Amino acid sequence: MPFQFDHLSTLTALIDEGTFEAASERLHVTSSAVSQRIRAMEQSAGKVLVRRTNPVTPTEAGDAVLRYARQVLLLDQDVLSELRQGGEGQRDHVPLAVNADSLSTWFLEALAELPAELGAVFEIHREDEEHTTSLLRSGSVMAAVTSTPEAVQGCSVQGLGVMRYQAVCSPEFAERHGLRGVEGLDAAPVVNFDRKDELQDRFLRNLTGEGSTGPRHYVPASEDFARTVLLGLGWGAVPEQQCRAHLESGRLVALAPEHPVEVRLFWQRWNLRSPLLDRITECVRTEAALRLHPM
């Protein structure tokens, strides 16, 4: 099923932008031209590739073609960079999926180590480490920090290290709820990142066999999550990098310091020979080795 290069570019623009009008502005063509290109791709594939919703989303078949499209565009970017034909101001678009705690503690430092002459611009998809692989499968991202060691089809996987969390609360919170270590913790207010966050329950189950039954706060931002715990609204599992100084100063207390929660992190990326993706991988692995515990 032959797909023209401009059709592949159109599909990625449509999914990235979410509407035919926004895709047309990005591509400097009419909305009608965008629609005609998508219909031509669907006729070639013999399947519907996008749902005409707001925003537009890919179908299962569309996911496969989108992944192919992004890989073709990446290879094209690599060739242009190597031949130095990208033109003044040309930038390589690199979508990545990263969990919020990695973003807040070490991942951005890895991207900052990339040479400026590479000319890459990043689109970061923030997602729970247990769910970032779904973005790889759909073709939405080129690489992801994930807790899944099994490689997604078409990807390679490498271990990064262990992110360690301490279950902590403020001294005032512990006194108010009569906490002695984990005793009584199951009924105390707890802070969760979002409704997919299971770290706090995992911590309790590992020590008591039961999860939390207490009131739950949901704070979907890593630094705000840590601040919510620091302010005494609840207890939570906070990355060591974010709570170490507060533990040393006494503003936080560790509820079970000998029993941290550990999350093994992996780097999954498209299994393509790409100088740009290779360099990103090198910087990510180097920074992870400095910031994470060894596996």
Image: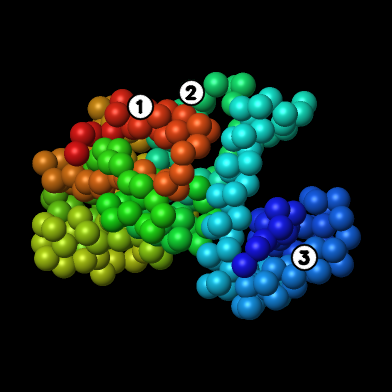
Relative to the observer, which residue lies in front, 67 or 249? 67
Residue at image position (63%, 41%) is: 76
Position of 183 with respect to 62 (left or right) is: left
Cα distance between the residues tagged 2 and 3: 39 Å
Query: For numbered disc 1, what is the local secondary structure?
Result: helix
Looking at the rendered image, the disc whose residue lies closer to the viewer, 2 or 3, is: 3
Give residue 46's position: percent from left, percent from top: 63, 78
Position of 107 with respect to 17 (left or right) is: left
Q: Where is mark 2, residue-wise?
A: 113
Residue 260 appears in view: yes
Which is more N-terminal, label 1 or label 2? 2
Residue at image position (77%, 26%) is: 88
Q: Amino acid at mark 1?
A: Thr
Q: Where is mark 1, residue-wise?
A: 286
Q: Amino acid at mark 2?
A: Glu
Query: For numbered disc 3, what is the local secondary structure?
Result: helix
Q: Amino acid at mark 3?
A: Arg
Q: Which quarter of the rendering shows the N terminus? A: bottom right
Categorize mark 1 by other alpha carbons within 10 Å: few (<14), some (14-19), many (20+).
some
Q: Which quarter of the rendering shows the C terminus? A: top left
Q: Where is mark 3, residue-wise?
A: 37
Cα distance between the residues tagged 3 and 1: 42 Å
Label pair 2/1, CB-CB below 8 angstroms? yes
Give residue 196's position: percent from left, percent from top: 38, 63
Total number of numbered discs in the rendering: 3
Residue 168 appears in view: no
* Residue with the most extreme front position: 2
Residue at image position (28%, 56%) is: 150
Relative to the observer, which residue lies in front, 232 or 289? 289
Residue at image position (13%, 58%) is: 206
